[in-house]
Image (tube, grey):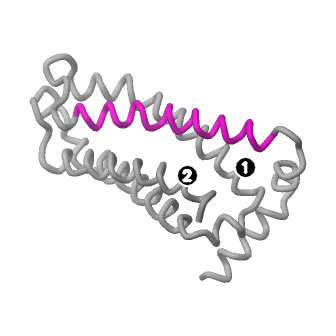
């Protein structure tokens, strides 16, 4: 399995994308800045939604209204962060993968994404029963907590990639 992963990382790093990112004078910093903006557009609305699930603003907005307005914005941020993250990784994929923070970043990223799927295909399927409740069901609150922790961890681990 590790051999396959290492081969894929080498393939990405040796790709035209990797060459371009490494050699274009200002491309890497532009990608980094865009990646950070994508993360902000992803995490800001996601955290707001998670906080709503935990009861913040329950008298102001229902869970379904919060989802309708916040989650599509978060999806745009995710698309930006993924696209720029792959481009950034392509510049030094084997080096990044060898850092101490890489397993944390990618493990927490997988956890965060799985949490989204479990939430939407689990407790959120019955949202009409609890959309106006002060606090969502325990399963939704656990999902919100996992989301807050996982995305925070992804951000911290991402920053540590440059230092470990």
Residue sitting at x 56%, y 65%: 102
- Contact, CB < 8 Å: mark 2 with mark 1? no
- Magenta stretch contains residue 44: yes
Identify the residue at the far top of this view.
60
- Magenta stretch contains residue 37: yes
Split into 4 quadrants, where in the image is the C terminus?
bottom right
Q: How many marks?
A: 2
- The residue singled out by tag 2 in the image is 159
Split into 4 quadrants, where in the image is the N terminus?
bottom right
The reply, left or right, for residue 5 in relation to residue 64 is: right
The reply, left or right, for residue 97 in relation to residue 153 is: right
The label on residue 8 is none
Which secondary structure lies at badge 2?
Answer: helix
Is 94 located above or below residue 45 in the figure? below
Q: Main secondary structure of the magenta part?
A: helix
Number of residues whose C-alpha sits closer than 10 Å to that of mark 1, classed few (under 14), some (14–19) or many (20 or more): many
The label on residue 87 is 1
Residue sitting at x 32%, y 29%: 67
Residue 81 position in % (x across, y down): 59, 42
Is 21 located above or below residue 94 in the figure? above
Q: Which residues are magenta?
A: 27-52
Asked where in the image residue 98 lies, by quadrant, the reply is bottom right
Is 112 located above or below residue 80 in the figure? below
Identify the residue at the far front of this view.
163
Residue sitting at x 67%, y 44%: 84
Q: Which of the two residues, 1 or 129, is positioned nearer the viewer here?
A: 1
Q: Which of the two discs, 2 and 1, labels the residue nearer the N terminus?
A: 1
In three-dimensional space, the C-alpha distance between marks 2 and 1, rounded to whole angstroms, equals 16 Å
Which secondary structure lies at badge 1?
Answer: helix
């Amino acid at each position: 399995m590790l051999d396959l992963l290492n081969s894929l990382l080498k393939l990405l790093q040796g790709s035209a994308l990797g060459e371009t990112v490494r050699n274009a004078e200002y491309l890497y910093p532009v990608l980094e800045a865009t990646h950070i903006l994508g993360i902000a557009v992803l995490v800001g609305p996601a955290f707001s939604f998670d906080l709503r699930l935990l009861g913040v603003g329950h008298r102001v907005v229902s869970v379904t209204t919060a989802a309708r307005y916040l989650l599509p914005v978060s999806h745009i941020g995710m698309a930006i962060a993924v696209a720029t993250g792959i481009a950034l990784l392509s510049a030094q994929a084997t080096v990044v993968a060898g850092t101490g923070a890489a397993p944390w970043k990618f493990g927490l990223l997988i956890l965060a994404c799985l949490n989204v799927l479990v939430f939407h295909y689990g407790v959120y399927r019955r949202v009409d029963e609890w959309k106006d409740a002060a606090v969502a069901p325990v399963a939704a609150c656990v999902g919100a907590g996992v989301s807050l922790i996982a995305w925070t961890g992804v951000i911290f681990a991402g920053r540590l990639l440059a230092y470990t």
